[in-house]
Structure formats: structure tokens, C-alpha cells
Image (cartoon, helix red, strand yellow):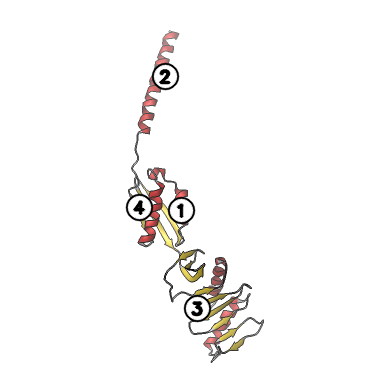
Amino acid sequence: MHLLISKKITIYLLLFCFLVSINNISLMNISFPKINQIEISGLNLDERKKIERIIYDSDFKSIFHLDKQYLKRKISSINIIEQFEIFKNYPSTLKIFIKETKILAQIKRNGFDYLIGSNGKLIRNNNLSADLPFIFGDLNLNEFLNFKNEIDKSKFDFKNITKLYYFKSKRWDIETSKGYLIKLSKDNVEKNLNLFVRLSDENKFENKLIIDFRQKDQIILNAK
């Protein structure tokens, strides 16, 4: 009786192993549908094509094999992009929602013209825009973003700036659309600009185009 039970157990084990092997072969032969649709919103056509190339060149076999972290690193390398989200729409559609960086200013580096984004990155640009201030000086982009933040806290409108001059002493001059040259102190940007706006509103700068705040507790006015 014991021998008969042992034989039955052996038969069942062999049958089980056979069925498992068959199922494993079937699973290995399952083919998932490839990514056949990529929907990208928030970018122009040329930039969308860049992202499509990244995905197709990565040769993901299907949406199930998508390496999301790898894709995020690649998309983050496109400087025009501020933020983005990736969604898998099974079985074969990839959706990417993108927010472009806000263009703040323009600068020349190594003989090339660049736009400066609010994400602190440079974007190659072959066409200068009269609507954006041009920055002169050798600076770290974070220094410009910090300066822009000081301006935004003041009553001065950043849109009135045509040129910005950065000095190694970490001080800035501003040239405005009305022809004023504002020489700011190093540490009181917001205070200087608020005072400039108030005095300008009171017409205190008649025939004076250079407003110098560099001396402590003084304002020096000069004609250009």
C-alpha cells in the first residue's frame, strides 16, 4: 500500500513538472505590443521629435519594459524643459506632458547666443529678441536667478529692462527702456529699486539718466 502511494506521488510530481515547463515556455513566447503611439504635449514640433527619437533609439521592447528613470534623465537633458510627467497608457501608448521653461533673458557665451530659462539652463538661440534683456558679464546663472528674484520682490517691472551688466564684485547695473542707467548697490537691490520707482513717479530725474545707488545712504544723479 505504501509503495502504491509513493508511485502515485512520483507520477503527480512528474506531471506537475511537465505542466510547469510547458507554461514557462508559453510565457517566454508571449509578445507584448510595442509602443506604437507617443503623445507629447507642451512643446513645438522640433522638440517633440527630439523626445520621440530618445524613446525609439532606446529600443524599449514594449511599454512594460520601459525604463522610466532612464527616460526621465534623457528628457531632463533637453534645456527648454522645466517640468514633465510620463504616463503609460496600456497597452502601447506613452503620454508625456511637458511645461516649457520661461525665457527670462539672453546672453553670449563663447561666441554663441543663448536664451536663459527660469530653470537656470542655457538654450541655444540664433535669433536675438528685442523683448528680452541682454546680459553682459561673466556670471553663474544662479546669480542671475537670485538677482531676478530680488527684482520681482520690488516694485520695479522686469519688463522695463533692456540690458543688464554684471560685475565681478557681484554688483549689477540696469539699463531701462526709457534710457536710465541704474547703478545698484551690492546688498540693497530691492530697496534701491523701490526708491527708484518712487522718485521716478515723482519726476525727480529730470534730465538725469544715471542714477547711482552705490554709495551708502546717497543717490548720485548725473546726465549721460
Q: In this view, does 146 lie to the left or right of 63?
A: right
Q: Which of marks 1 and 4 is nearer the N terminus?
A: 4
User: Which quarter of the picture shows residue 145?
Assistant: bottom right
Residue that badge 3 annotates: 161
How many residues crowd mark 3 within 10 Å: few (<14), some (14–19), many (20+)?
many
Q: Which of marks 1 and 3 is nearer the N terminus?
A: 1
Residue that badge 4 annotates: 38
How many residues crowd mark 1 within 10 Å: few (<14), some (14–19), many (20+)?
few
- How far apart, in angstroms, are the residues tagged by discs 3 and 4? 40 Å
Of circles 4 and 2, the one toward us is 4
User: Residue 102 appears at what percent x and percent y?
Assistant: 45, 67
Q: Do the residues labelled 1 and 2 touch (CB within 8 Å)?
A: no
Q: In this view, does 188 lie to the left or right of 133?
A: right
* Depicted 113 relative to depicted 76: above or below: below
Residue that badge 1 annotates: 74
Residue that badge 2 annotates: 13
Q: Residue at x 45, y 58 (%)?
A: 78
Q: Which of 224 and 76 is in front in this view?
A: 224
- How far apart, in angstroms, are the residues tagged by discs 1 and 3? 35 Å
User: Which quarter of the picture shows residue 198?
Assistant: bottom right
SS for tag 2? helix
Q: Earlier in the sequence, mark 3 or mark 4?
A: 4
* Depicted 98 relative to depicted 210: above or below: above
- How far apart, in angstroms, are the residues tagged by discs 1 and 2? 49 Å
Looking at the rendered structure, the kind of residue marked 1 is Lys
Q: Which of 218 and 7 is in front in this view?
A: 218
How many residues crowd mark 4 within 10 Å: few (<14), some (14–19), many (20+)?
some
- How far apart, in angstroms, are the residues tagged by discs 4 and 2? 47 Å
User: Residue 149 appears at what percent x and percent y?
Assistant: 54, 70
Looking at the figure, which quarter contains the N terminus?
top left
- Total numbered labels placed on residues in the image: 4
User: Residue 195 appears at what percent x and percent y?
Assistant: 58, 82
